Amino acid sequence: MNPTRKPSIATIALWSAFLLGAGIPELGRAQQAGPAGAAASASGPVLQVIHAGAVPTQAAPAAHFTGNVRIQPVLDATPSSPVSAALVSFDKGARAAWHTHPRGQRLVVTSGVGRAQQWGRAPQEIRAGDVVVIPAGVKHWHGAAPSTPMSHIAMQEAVDGQNVVWLEKVTDAQYAEPITQEETGTMQSRSQAGPYADIAPRLDGYTRDVLFGDMWEAPELSKRDRSLITVAALVPGYRMNELPYHLKFARQNGVTEEELAGLITHLAFYAGWPSANSAVEVARRVIAEEP
């Protein structure tokens, strides 16, 4: 699991195709203006765009959720398709109660950082772009991280009109269990994964969940742009402890060696030659260590 990835175009396209394949009743009732629209309506179902805010958001029932949770329907079950879907948004610390689904469930995390846990196993961290596959009948819960909100699209299929069986709420002790990350069939502890976890675990959590889990994942700027901004902020302040990491991160985010050199040279005129000279030495070491 990559802790910093965003939903890819392929992921969005995959789930869009799934939802369209299940059938959306509104598509057959779309309104079109003008002669072209009238012709399309006469020939059969037409495309409809349901704009953001057009579908009312509901507060999740307190009997089955802890904290502030909002639900926005995306797809309603019909006589021809028992599949339903909804966008569920959790404020930080909010979560669903333990529950099961008769035909299983799929979650597509759209933003933020959260938790998902199967009964009898350690909770796992989930981030934007992750897909959570929950088998039929498996007792589980999911929700936001303690310091970061999280949203996901939940898709499930009903059996005899029922798509979920609610159980007891997740206790504070269960919610506070150390998280793990499952990769290639192994469980790797992340409770001590950060550089500050041994002495400042709260700072470590904010760094993981808020800074890299939320801010770096925000869609307004690309990660490449964020890396350029961060390096430009570190060099004038002579932050040579943080600079090596962010130079490596910038390279991972697509910043070229020539762009880094141009950035540092540009900063020399505004931040001063000493800061630029020190940054050049750090960049030289970082690039030399690349495979």
Image: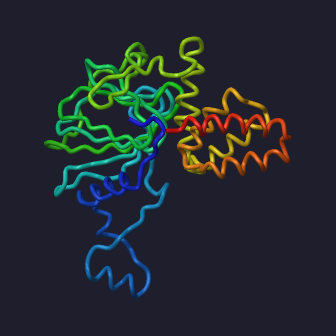
Please provide percent x and percent y for residue 190.
43, 21
Count of numbered badges drawn on the protein: 0
Residue 14 relative to residue 212: left or right: left
Q: Is residue 248 above or below residue 223?
A: above
State the colouring used for the structure image: rainbow
Please provide percent x and percent y for residue 279.
73, 37
Query: Which residue lies most toward the bottom here?
Result: 35
Say whether residue 186 is visible: yes
Say whether residue 70 is visible: no
Q: Is residue 38 above or below residue 71?
A: below
Q: Is residue 12 above or below residue 218?
A: below
Residue that appears at 37% across and 16% down: 174
- Which quarter of the figure has residue 87? top left
Please provide percent x and percent y for residue 210.
57, 32
Query: Which residue lies most toward the left here?
Result: 160
Residue that appears at 28% across and 73% down: 45
Residue that appears at 20% across and 40% down: 162
- Which quarter of the figure has residue 171? top left
For the residue pair 225 and 34, the one nearer the viewer reads as: 225
Query: Which residue lies most toward the front here?
Result: 288
Residue 116 relative to residue 289: left or right: left
- Which quarter of the figure has residue 128? top left
For the residue pair 120 and 37, the one nearer the viewer reads as: 120
Location of the N terminus (image quadrant): top left
Please provide percent x and percent y for residue 165.
23, 31
